[in-house]
Amino acid sequence: MGGAFNTSTPIYIQLGDRINHQIIRGELLPGDKLPSVREMAVQAGVNPNTVQRTYRELERMEIVESRRGQGTFVTENEDILVKLREQLKEMHISHFVGDMKMMGYTENEMINGLRHYLDVNREEDGLS
Amino acid sequence: MGGAFNTSTPIYIQLGDRINHQIIRGELLPGDKLPSVREMAVQAGVNPNTVQRTYRELERMEIVESRRGQGTFVTENEDILVKLREQLKEMHISHFVGDMKMMGYTENEMINGLRHYLDVNREEDGLS
DNA sequence: AACAGTGTATTATGCTACTAGTACACTAGA
DNA sequence: TCTAGTGTACTAGTAGCATAATACACTGTT
């Protein structure tokens, strides 16, 4: 069991997100081998086919490279990983700003709201 | 047609979000009548049943009140609307922070990233 | 050559959520 | 009473997702 998945988003997407986060955080380095399709399926408690779909997506994004008979590896092209980190950051910020603007919040309210939230929740970090 | 919907999220959710935003921004006031199920369906270009599902959800959240034979109205209970605004704000900030933390960003990076994004995109606001 | 481990492809099945169509129930007003 | 406008309920169709089972293709090792 690799932790539960959210039912509102496809598993293959969530699994891909997890792997992306591991890469971005440096827990998976360029050239590292990912668990085989079958092993990852056991670890995550999902069907091998679902894992394969995740790997296929990641390969399409050029984040990993699959070699038949050998396994699936994190790309050695660090540029792509740097860009991935920036893209995801930009995407999340953009979504956040878009949502807040739709609700009528000003830019100052966003920044102050974020600051305030971080202050209040600073100590309660490692909760479940 | 009231603008396109995203295919990755249920229409009834997106429609509910739109209405919530209108309320929060004050474009819909307490006691205001919403378009009838059928009229809203035409406006939004969706099935009346989808609209009804949206209205049902909003009623469950006590944001609107449906009166058979009369219509659907924004609640007169302003406390709920104030709380709604706060809840949505908190929710979006919380999601944002959670996502950024998962990617390994520090709190300072979040705030600076947000500031930088707002600076860069300040003039390009009213784009399509 | 044989084998084990790997990725890939195919087909079928069940499930769930969303959407659509249609009919019913209630209210207000003419 | 009738009618138009409203919310509500029911049934069915559709699509995407996850699973399952199986077979194939390639690589490295023995």
Image (spheres, coloured by chain):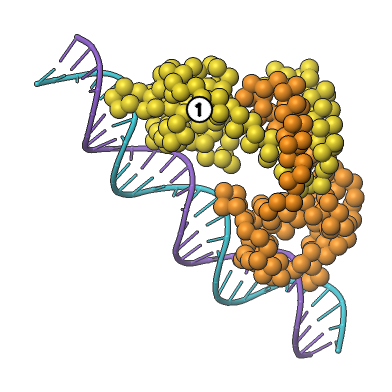
Chain colours: A orange, B yellow, C purple, D cyan
Most foreground residue, A63 or A86:
A86
- Horizontal and vertical percent for residue A42? 67, 70
Total marks in image: 1
The subunit carrying tag 1 is B
Mark 1: which secondary structure? helix
* Residue located beneath label 1 in the image: B80
Lateral position of residue C24 relative to residue A10, left or right: left
Most foreground residue, D8 or A48:
D8
Name the residue located 39 percent from the left edge and 27 percent from the top edge. Answer: B65
Residue A125 appears in the figure? yes
Indicate the quadrant where residue B94 lies: top right
Looking at the image, residue A121 lies above or below residue D23: above
Lateral position of residue B95 relative to residue A21, left or right: left
- Horizontal and vertical percent for residue D16? 56, 50
Looking at the image, residue D14 lies above or below residue A95: below
Indicate the quadrant where residue B37 lies: top left
Residue A56 appears in the figure? no
Q: Quadrant of the C terminus of chain B?
A: top right
Lateral position of residue A108 relative to residue D15, left or right: right
Name the residue located 41 percent from the left edge and 35 percent from the top edge. Answer: B56
Amino acid type, callout 1: Ile
Lateral position of residue B91 relative to residue B15, left or right: right
- Horizontal and vertical percent for residue B106? 83, 42
Most foreground residue, C10 or D15:
D15
Name the residue located 72 percent from the left edge and 28 percent from the top edge. Answer: A113
- Horizontal and vertical percent for residue D28? 87, 77
Most foreground residue, A119 or B32:
A119
Q: Residues within 10 Å of mark 1 (few under 14, many from 20)?
A: some
Looking at the image, residue A97 lies above or below residue A126: above
